[in-house]
Image (cartoon, rainbow, N blue to C red):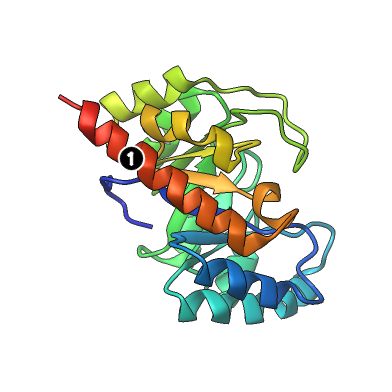
């Protein structure tokens, strides 16, 4: 994931909580179905040793497809795996700590909900991207913050740091987010709750169409 804005929005996959069983095969199918910029490894209530065992085959698949492997929440696990980066919630440690432990080339993202203030703070602290949401109702995780398209439009107009849109995004509702300025669309259940290859292909088509429309109407 680049540290400067790119012309087109890109897809950012987030894992389901269950990444055992046949999930490595599903991830392979998803990454082969269309362009994906990053994959976030997100598991809960699993100790670090077990999480590392689950992560290793997925990390190898991402590497084979040149997809950034990002660890959710845990700087320690990201360091252990030598992951490409870490995504931090508001209570998961600081950007400075992540940078110190993971190195200057690691991708460090920060959840900023619907807050311009938190996003600007994250940028000042040296984050590589900020994540806004939820934009739509979602069952992936409990949400108490709702973000609007105007937040993406404002960020795109005034800040160079890439932003991620997250929360209830499907191929059918992704276009407004792309046109509003999301650099990445983060998705989970819309991919893993069905045919992952078909979903990634559908997202790729919608993102490409919306991106081309944005370029057409840009001054």
Res 105 visible: yes
Above or below: residue 162 compared with residue 115? below
Picture coordinates of residue 145 (x, y %)? 65, 24
Q: Which residue lies furthest to the right in this view?
A: 45
Q: In this view, does 117 lie to the left or right of 134?
A: left
Q: Residue 78's quadrant in the figure?
A: bottom right
Q: Residue furthest left?
A: 219
Picture coordinates of residue 211 (x, y %)? 33, 40
Secondary structure found at label 1: helix
Residue at screen point 56% across, 70% down: 79
> What is the quadrant of the C terminus in the image?
top left
Q: In this view, does 38 lie to the left or right of 91?
A: left
Nearer the observer, 73 or 11:
11
Residue at screen point 42% across, 44% down: 207
Mark 1 burial class by Cα count in 10 Å: few <14, some 14-19, many 20+: many
Q: Residue 55's quadrant in the figure?
A: bottom right
> What is the quadrant of the N terminus in the image?
bottom left
Residue at screen point 44% across, 37% down: 122
Picture coordinates of residue 160 (x, y %)? 27, 37
Look at mark 1 in the image and give the residue it sits on: 211
Above or below: residue 81 compared with residue 219? below
Q: Is residue 203 left or right of residue 22?
A: left
Residue at screen point 70% across, 29% down: 137
Res 126 visible: no
Q: In this view, does 64 lie to the left or right of 60?
A: left
Nearer the observer, 160 or 177:
177
Picture coordinates of residue 214 (x, y %)? 29, 32
């Amino acid at each position: 994931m680049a540290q400067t804005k790119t012309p087109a929005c890109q897809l950012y996959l987030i894992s389901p909580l269950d990444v055992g069983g046949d999930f490595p095969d599903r991830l392979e199918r998803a990454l082969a179905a269309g362009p994906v910029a990053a994959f976030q490894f997100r598991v809960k209530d699993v100790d670090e040793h077990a999480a590392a065992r689950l992560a290793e085959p997925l990390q190898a698949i991402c590497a084979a497809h040149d997809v950034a492997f990002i660890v959710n929440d845990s700087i320690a696990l990201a360091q252990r795996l030598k992951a490409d980066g870490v995504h931090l919630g508001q209570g998961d440690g600081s950007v400075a700590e992540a940078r110190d432990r993971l190195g200057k080339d690691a991708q460090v993202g920060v959840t900023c909900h619907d807050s311009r203030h938190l996003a600007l703070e994250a940028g000042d602290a040296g984050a590589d991207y900020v994540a806004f949401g939820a934009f739509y109702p979602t069952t992936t995780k409990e949400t108490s913050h709702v973000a609007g398209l105007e937040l993406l439009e404002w960020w795109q107009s005034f800040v160079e740091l890439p932003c991620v849109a997250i929360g209830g995004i499907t191929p059918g509702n992704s276009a407004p987010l792309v046109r509003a300025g999301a650099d990445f669309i983060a998705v989970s259940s819309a991919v893993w709750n069905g045919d992952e290859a078909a979903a990634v292909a559908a997202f790729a088509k919608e993102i490409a169409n919306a991106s081309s429309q944005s370029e057409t109407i840009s001054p």
